[in-house]
Image (cartoon, rainbow, N blue to C red):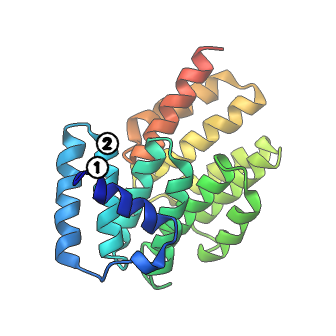
Amino acid sequence: MKRLLPALLAVLLLSGCSLLQPPADPAAAAEHYRQAKTLIMTKDYASAAEQLGMAQALAPGDGRYALEHADLREALGEDETARSAYRQGLDGLADADPLHPVLAWRLALLDALKLDDPQAARSLAENLRPDSFRALDLDGVLLLQAGDPAAAVTRFEQALPLAHDSALEAFALYHAALAHRRLGHDQPTFANLFKAINQATDRGLAKDIERFFLAINHN
């Protein structure tokens, strides 16, 4: 029963039960985060996600916890829970926080690609600098979901040089693979996908790449 209490509390917090919102406790949040990292090392991802949810609840102003919690929920296929984690993360951060646009972009990608809510994704674009990698990448995803994969490919190609590291590039490479697949272009689909596989470090993205790779190899 004791093991179930943190999980139950995390679920209630993410569902918006504000009366149960605990007071901020950065030290306790850091301990939950440490436990999550240990659980990830043992591949107990479900328990790790619970610990990250507690860390996020106890330190709502720390975007790192929100991002890692939501990302792991995506990897587990818990998209609605991930959406709640991203939203609560955004609510807890100041607009000037460096992680604010990161959370907004990841939430927009989730809305557009997995939850079929392009309107919600589009509304989040205002949190992104128009000439940034994330803004161009999101615009490409919205074009892809609107049925214009050729224009989407162009956006992803424009975004790539703006990525500040290879892990960020992996998102645009994966999205380009999705677009080329829609166009029936096998060679660039696999070329972009293999690059993305080698560069991805975010667990949610890595799982998306794995799922896509398995799907196209079974067809």
In which image quadrant can residue 200 be found?
Answer: top left
Callout 2: 10 Å neighbours few (<14), some, many (20+)? some
- Does residue 158 appear in the picture of this structure? yes
Q: How many numbered discs?
A: 2
In which image quadrant can residue 133 be found?
Answer: bottom right
Residue name at image x 66 percent, y 50 percent: 115
In the rendered view, tell whether residue 108 sits above or below residue 76.
below
Residue name at image x 29 percent, y 66 percent: 55
Q: Identify which amino acid the numbered label 1 is placed on.
A: Ala
Q: Position of residue 10 (x, y in %)?
A: 38, 62
Q: Callout 1: helix, strand or loop?
A: helix
- Does residue 133 appear in the picture of this structure? no
Q: Identify which amino acid the numbered label 2 is placed on.
A: Tyr
In the rendered view, tell whether residue 52 sits above or below residue 126.
above
Q: Which mark is residue 45?
A: 2
Q: Position of residue 120 (x, y in %)?
A: 71, 64
Q: Is residue 197 left or right of residue 39?
A: right
Q: Report the residue marked by disc 1.
A: 48
